[in-house]
């Protein structure tokens, strides 16, 4: 556990604290949560109850009906789980910018110590750099997002082939269940009226009351929450895992897990998914290696990248990529589309339009076609920097699995990150190229387009 924990300030434990506070920023779940387990240990050591705080504000970047709804759909189940465990729960929805923004600090004023999630991107990264100095209690950040803790690696890895042997060397020590949550004292502290009551039927009304982007509607394909994540995991294991190795790059085969939104919002942990896949494969004599490669090696390579990079710009790409992009940045393009045309899926390419429509309707693009989606934005943008800005905007605003280390790494992969040089060509230089004809040869494009038209 200690290799997952960072103490981010030097404040002493408050001796008259009434509880230990866990702030669920990114791992919005009770089970398989190392940060919550660490908070439980702190509380038990001091014979204090434990309080679980989860907030949702109207001010985070690209706040929308889609993202708010997905988070809120997980709240009722979290409340029930915590009640059974004897842990206090405050979920607070900050609806308007004029509403107070001090709930965390009000709760911290009565806490002996605070534990939160160690996460390398988005608002958690900002919070974990700014909040600790404002507190008079210890502030611990715990990695419960990776199987092998991301801070285990002391430098940025060049690619999957360099991080893979390092992960395999220590994986046996980490591929084991997170500690169970058992508190010595049930939560019995009287708190100010800070909690927002969330019931399933009332979620649309709550979302409508918030000062957020109401033009990005809730996903038509994904419902939030740990229960729904577990249901999708079971469906994947029983009906898709055996087909994953051969069919995961064929969207019409529906062989992928669809779990990335649940991993991003912390409704599932990669650890519990990996262990479930391994156990199911062993029991049914299946091979899960390809799936575990994506879930562990590729995902944790993304966290490693995000951990050591401050800003996701072209400047963070390898030297060979920067050189070839600089050489070809001003190459003539056959077509150029504006950001609005990309957003509205108004290009000449029916496959690209379908991928964008999938993003608009569901909040996700199939992984193989997402590569193609990104490559074509490079091809049809006036320069590489604008192509990156367009991808980041569309991903962060519409994707349920956006604002995530994997999402940012996948986008920058389109520009050559964690890849190798290929044959030189206009616009792309020596970074990998993908074509419409290649997609038609390798996948059932027509079936995908028909399915997306039905969805959209």
Image (spheres, rainbow, N blue to C red):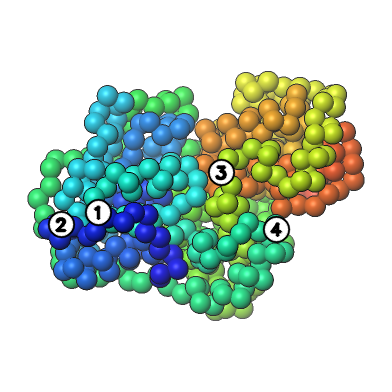
**CB of mark 1 within 8 Å of CB of mark 2?**
yes
The quarter of the displayed image where residue 68 is located: top left
Residue under circle 3? Answer: 310
Give neighbour class at mark 1: few <14, some 14-19, many 20+ (Cα, 10 Å).
many
CA separation in Å, label 4 and label 1? 39 Å
Q: Secondary structure at mark 1?
A: loop
Residue under circle 2? Answer: 17
Q: Nearer the viewer, residue 427 or 260?
A: 427
Q: Position of residue 114 (x, y in %)?
A: 28, 55
Q: Mark 4 or mark 1, which has the lower sequence index?
A: 1
Is the N terminus in the top left, top right, bottom left or bottom right quadrant? Answer: bottom left
Q: Secondary structure at mark 4?
A: loop
Q: Mark 2 or mark 3, which has the lower sequence index?
A: 2
Residue under circle 1? Answer: 137
Residue under circle 4? Answer: 159
Q: Residue at x 42, y 25 (%)?
A: 214
CA separation in Å, label 1 and label 2? 9 Å
Query: Is residue 327 placed above or below 131 in the rendered structure?
Result: above
Give neighbour class at mark 3: few <14, some 14-19, many 20+ (Cα, 10 Å).
few
**CB of mark 3 within 8 Å of CB of mark 1?**
no
Query: Is residue 335 placed above or below 436 in the rendered structure?
Result: above
Q: Mark 4 or mark 3, which has the lower sequence index?
A: 4
Relative to 429, 400 lies left or right: left
């Amino acid at each position: 556990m200690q290799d997952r924990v960072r103490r981010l300030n030097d404040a002493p434990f408050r001796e008259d604290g009434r509880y230990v506070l866990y702030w669920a920023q990114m791992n919005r779940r009770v089970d398989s949560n190392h940060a919550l387990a660490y908070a439980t240990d702190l509380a038990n050591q001091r014979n204090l109850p434990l309080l679980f705080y989860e907030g949702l504000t109207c001010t985070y970047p690209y706040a929308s009906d889609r993202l708010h709804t997905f988070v809120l759909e997980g709240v009722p189940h979290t409340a029930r789980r915590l009640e059974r465990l004897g842990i206090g729960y405050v979920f607070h929805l900050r609806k308007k910018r004029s509403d107070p923004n001090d709930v965390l600090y009000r709760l911290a004023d009565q806490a002996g110590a605070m534990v939160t999630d160690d996460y390398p991107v988005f608002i958690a990264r900002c919070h974990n750099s700014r909040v600790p100095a404002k507190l008079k209690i210890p502030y611990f950040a715990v990695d419960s997002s990776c199987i092998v803790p991301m801070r285990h690696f002391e430098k940025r890895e060049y690619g999957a082939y360099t991080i893979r042997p390092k992960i395999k060397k220590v994986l046996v020590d980490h591929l084991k269940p997170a500690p169970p949550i058992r508190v010595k004292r049930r939560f019995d502290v009287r708190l100010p009226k800070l909690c927002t009551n969330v019931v399933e039927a009332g979620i649309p009304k709550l979302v409508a009351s918030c000062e957020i982007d109401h033009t990005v509607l809730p996903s038509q394909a994904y419902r939030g929450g740990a229960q729904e994540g577990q249901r999708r995991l079971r469906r994947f294991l029983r009906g898709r895992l055996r087909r994953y190795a051969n069919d995961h790059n064929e969207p019409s085969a529906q062989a992928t897990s669809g779990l990335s939104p649940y991993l991003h919002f912390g409704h599932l942990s990669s650890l519990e998914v990996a262990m479930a896949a391994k156990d199911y494969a062993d029991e049914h004599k299946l091979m899960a290696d390809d799936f575990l490669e994506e879930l562990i090696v590729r995902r944790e390579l993304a966290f490693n990248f995000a951990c050591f990079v401050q800003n996701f710009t072209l400047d963070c790409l390898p030297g060979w990529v920067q050189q070839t992009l600089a050489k070809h940045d001003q190459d003539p393009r056959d077509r150029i589309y504006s950001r609005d045309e990309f957003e509205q899926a108004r290009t000449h390419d029916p496959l690209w339009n379908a991928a964008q429509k999938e993003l608009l309707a569901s909040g996700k693009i199939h992984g193989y076609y997402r590569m193609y989606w990104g490559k074509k934005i490079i091809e049809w943008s006036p320069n590489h920097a604008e192509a990156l800005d367009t991808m980041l905007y569309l991903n962060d605003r519409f994707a349920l699995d956006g604002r995530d280390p994997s999402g940012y790494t996948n986008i920058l992969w389109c520009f050559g990150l964690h890849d190798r040089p290929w044959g030189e060509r206009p616009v792309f230089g020596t970074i990998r190229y993908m074509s419409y004809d290649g997609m038609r040869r390798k996948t059932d494009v027509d079936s995908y387009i028909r399915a997306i038209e039905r969805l959209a």
